[in-house]
Image (spheres, rainbow, N blue to C red):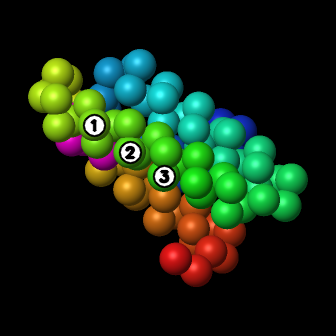
Amino acid sequence: MRLPGTRLPALRSLMLPTIAQDLLKHDLQDAEELAAQGKPAAGYQTLVTGLEQVKKTRARGVFPWAAELVRCYEEAMEAYAREHHLKL
């Protein structure tokens, strides 16, 4: 199964609330749009920026699911880098 609007795998985690899944989906779709424009590195940077924001949220301890969202971002970033042949 693929994430809608992308060639990347669908999110595996059912432990995340819809809003958290939507954040990642939005960033992935933005990244894929940039890749389609020939800017895969800029797309990857979109994911890096999103991950940094989630890590800040995790550090504040506000949402108990933030650590799971960090893991999902990291997995998505690995898949994106593979899909677009990025050397990190």
**Is residue 19 shown to the viewer in this render?**
yes
17 falls in the magenta region: no
At 21% from the left and 36% from the top, the residue drawn is: 58
**Drawn side of residue 61 relative to residue 56, left or right:** left
At 47% from the left and 65% from the top, the residue drawn is: 78
Q: Is residue 48 above or below residue 23?
A: below
Could you say where residue 19 lies in the image, as x and y percent from the top left?
Answer: 41, 19
Q: Which residue is mark 1?
A: 56
Number of marks present in the image shown: 3
- Residue extending farthest to the right is 37
Work out how far the residue at label 3 is from the one at label 2, CA to CA, in angstroms: 6 Å
Q: Which residue is mark 2?
A: 52
At 49% from the left and 45% from the top, the residue drawn is: 49
Dot label at residue 71: none
Work out how far the residue at label 1 is from the one at label 2, CA to CA, in angstroms: 6 Å
Dot label at residue 48: 3
Q: Quadrant of residue 54?
A: top left
Q: Is residue 17 above or below residue 74?
A: above
**Decide: marks 3, 2 in contact (CB < 8 A)?**
yes
Could you say where residue 47 lies in the image, as x and y percent from the top left?
Answer: 52, 48
Could you say where residue 38 lies in the image, as x and y percent from the top left?
Answer: 84, 61
Q: Is residue 15 above or below residue 38?
A: above
Q: Give the amino acid type for the residue marked by disc 2 in the picture.
A: Glu
**Drawn side of residue 4 relative to residue 74, left or right:** right
Q: Quadrant of residue 87?
A: bottom right
**Decide: marks 1, 2 in contact (CB < 8 A)?**
yes
Magenta range is 66-70
Q: Secondary structure at mark 2?
A: helix
Q: Secondary structure at mark 3?
A: helix
